[in-house]
């Protein structure tokens, strides 16, 4: 965003506000300093990513009271400026005695407690860490302001619950410099400390958090090979002529890059190769080269051939069952990059820098493309899960029809209610599932905890398995019960793309209907909200016998009397109930 002027941001943000559709994503900003110029910059940053953001600001220096007033917003951002906790603290701190200092610290700690308590049910809260940097950066020793800052940040780190993320603004200041981050003239005249440049960088810095909670984080990192994973061209320089070892200057760069890539894989990012090369040469290098850190065990998919990369990348997306905009490609060739950008603009493309020493930094600066606010056990098993899927595809070829194939898999669903250990995964499913998602509502861990505690809601999730392996937790339904107890509305119904095509959705829905029937529910209502990615489930409820009661503005509403529901009776899918019993 560095190249765009503030006046242009104002204009483009206004235009985006008119064109974006869907629910408003409401963000409240509290501060004890003047930050009004953040509004349009934040909105523009998120709107360009497809998030229909509307930012509202609380009253100046009214953080505690505002935390009660705006607690029902989608997200809250808090600027708690250390120098303004007490007017002029940046120069008064060293003149305070211990008792005066302790009073200030105790007061702020109690305010932190109140704010966190008020916002306990807010889905997402970002609190800037306290910073003394701009007033003490030239000191050889820590002063009293630094010590107050450290004490408050330690307290903040200890107190934050799962819905709160702390933002270290010192990282932003370090990136663009103190000179470009602050304007002391406006700070002393109107308590407006930060510059337009700071707000631009700040908005970009926190953007991945919002991308994660709205289901827009990237899922797959696809890598070229020559001059991307190693220095040199394998077909020309040969097995022994390429460099990726810490023993040489260029090799050190590529060893570091491979290590960064492996760390992403450990966090659940899907790793793939897409290279114009002889497949046998690449396979030999992966298996036998002593300096190659990325091995077959780390790679989910490979397209090594001489076909054009646009076709290969389309095939990768199809094979992984993910959308093109979920993919990031790292490539060195300017020709290939331009070709891909022209034909597949949905894919984020990162170019290997011409100055190789900048390559590791470039990779680190883009790690947040894959940021996930929720971490789950399934993340560490993703590679294994996709390899198990390869076994299933091999089995599929042995059968002439899909029903015989499904019967051979020994399919099993384990249906459970929500509990603490699986809350991160349940939240993650709402944030990442796009294709089989009837309403595409995104929920944080805080939201899921509220559903579990609220008697008016029933939450069910299922894990799936077959003879090839365990898919993990892959399905979810959140159901709201009518206060009179006779009607149930399906708030959320989703299933991971990993298990599409196995009829799990029908077995799961049969279970839900049986459960609701035992609760003496008579009527089930449901909604389908059309998105660019969930068209394949547009007729799901019609297929189950639901009647359409409303159809407008890309939203269909349905209902069905339970007595009219026709069970699928899929005998080849075994259902284990939460108590350990089995139902078919």
Image: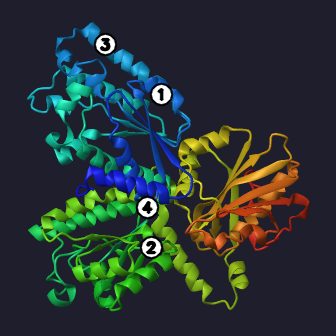
**How many C-alpha atoms fall within 10 Å of the one at disc 1: few (<14), some, or many (≥20)?**
many
Q: Where is residue 92 in the image (x, y as percent from the top left)?
A: 19, 15
**N-terminal-most mark, 4 or 2:** 4
**N-terminal-most mark, 2 or 3:** 3
**Alpha-carbon distance for marks 4 and 3?**
44 Å
State which quarter of the image contains the N terminus.
bottom left
Query: Which residue is at the front of the view, 329 or 237?
Result: 329
**Alpha-carbon distance for marks 2 and 3?**
54 Å
Residue 324 tag number: 2
Q: Is residue 7 left or right of residue 16?
A: left
Residue 102 tag number: 3
Contact between marks 1 and 2 (CB within 8 A): the answer is: no
**Alpha-carbon distance for marks 1 and 2?**
40 Å
Q: Position of residue 214 (x, y in %)?
A: 50, 54
State whether residue 471 appears in this view: yes
Q: Position of residue 190 (x, y in %)?
A: 26, 27
Quadrant in the rendering for residue 398:
bottom right
Question: Secondary structure under badge 4?
Answer: loop
Q: Is residue 390 above or below residue 453?
A: below
Q: Where is residue 266 in the image (x, y as percent from the top left)?
A: 39, 60
**How many C-alpha atoms fall within 10 Å of the one at disc 2: few (<14), some, or many (≥20)?**
many
Q: Is residue 5 above or below residue 318?
A: above
Question: What residue is rendered at 77% in x and 72% in y?
Answer: 543
Residue 268 tag number: 4
**N-terminal-most mark, 1 or 2:** 1
Residue 66 tag number: 1
Task: Give the foreground label among 4 and 3.
Answer: 3
**N-terminal-most mark, 1 or 3:** 1
Query: Which residue is at the front of the view, 277 or 103?
Result: 103
């Amino acid at each position: 965003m560095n190249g765009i002027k503030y006046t242009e941001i104002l204009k483009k943000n206004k235009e985006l506000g008119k064109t974006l559709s869907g629910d408003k994503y409401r963000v409240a900003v509290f501060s004890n300093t003047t930050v009004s110029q953040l509004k349009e910059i934040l909105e523009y940053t998120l709107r360009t990513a497809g998030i229909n953001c509307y930012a509202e600001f609380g009253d100046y220096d009214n953080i505690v009271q505002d935390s009660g007033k705006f607690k029902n917003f989608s997200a809250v951002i808090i600027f708690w400026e250390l120098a303004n906790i007490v007017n002029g603290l940046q120069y008064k701190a060293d003149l305070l005695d211990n008792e005066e200092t302790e009073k200030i610290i105790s007061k702020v700690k109690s305010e932190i407690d109140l704010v966190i308590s008020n916002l306990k049910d807010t889905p997402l809260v970002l609190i800037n860490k306290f910073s003394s940097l701009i007033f003490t950066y030239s000191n050889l020793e820590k002063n009293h302001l630094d010590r107050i800052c450290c004490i408050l940040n330690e307290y903040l780190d200890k107190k934050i619950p799962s819905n709160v993320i702390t933002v270290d603004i010192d990282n932003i200041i370090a990136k663009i410099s103190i000179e470009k981050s602050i304007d002391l003239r406006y700070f002393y005249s109107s308590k407006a400390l930060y510059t337009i440049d700071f707000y631009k960088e700040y908005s970009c810095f926190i953007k991945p958090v919002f991308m994660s909670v709205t289901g827009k984080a990237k899922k797959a990192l696809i890598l070229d090979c020559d001059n991307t994973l190693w220095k040199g061209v394998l077909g020309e320089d040969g097995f022994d002529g390429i460099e990726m070892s810490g023993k040489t200057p260029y090799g050190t760069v590529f060893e570091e890059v491979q290590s960064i890539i492996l760390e992403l894989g450990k966090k659940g990012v899907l790793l793939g190769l897409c290279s114009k090369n002889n497949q046998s040469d690449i396979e030999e290098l992966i298996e036998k080269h002593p300096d190659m850190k990325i091995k077959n065990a780390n790679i989910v998919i490979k397209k090594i051939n001489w076909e054009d990369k646009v076709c290969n990348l389309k095939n990768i997306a199809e094979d992984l069952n993910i959308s093109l905009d979920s993919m990031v490609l790292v490539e060195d060739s300017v020709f290939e990059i331009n070709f891909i950008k022209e034909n597949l603009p949905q894919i984020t493309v990162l170019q290997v820098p011409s100055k190789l020493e900048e390559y590791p930094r470039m990779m680190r600066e883009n790690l947040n493309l894959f940021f996930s606010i929720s971490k789950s056990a399934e993340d560490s098993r993703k590679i294994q899960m996709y390899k198990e899927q390869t076994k299933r595809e091999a089995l599929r070829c042995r059968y002439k029809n899909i029903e015989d194939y499904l019967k051979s898999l020994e399919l099993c669903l384990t249906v459970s209610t929500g509990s603490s250990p699986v809350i991160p995964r349940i939240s993650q499913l709402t944030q990442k599932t796009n294709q089989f998602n009837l309403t595409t509502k995104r929920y944080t861990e805080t939201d899921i905890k509220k559903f579990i505690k609220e008697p008016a809601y029933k939450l069910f999730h299922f894990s799936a398995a077959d003879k090839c392996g365990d898919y993990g937790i892959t399905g979810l339904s959140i159901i709201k019960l009518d206060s009179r107890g006779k009607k149930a509305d399906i708030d959320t119904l989703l299933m991971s793309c990993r298990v599409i095509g196995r009829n799990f959705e029908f077995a799961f829905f049969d279970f839900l209907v049986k459960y609701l029937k035992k609760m003496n529910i008579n009527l089930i209502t449901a909604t389908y909200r059309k998105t660019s990615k969930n068209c394949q489930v547009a007729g799901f409820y019609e297929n189950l016998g639901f009647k359409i009661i409303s159809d407008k503005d890309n939203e269909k509403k349905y209902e069905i009397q339970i007595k009219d529901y026709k069970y699928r009776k899929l005998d080849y899918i075994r259902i284990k109930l939460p108590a350990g019993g089995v139902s078919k």
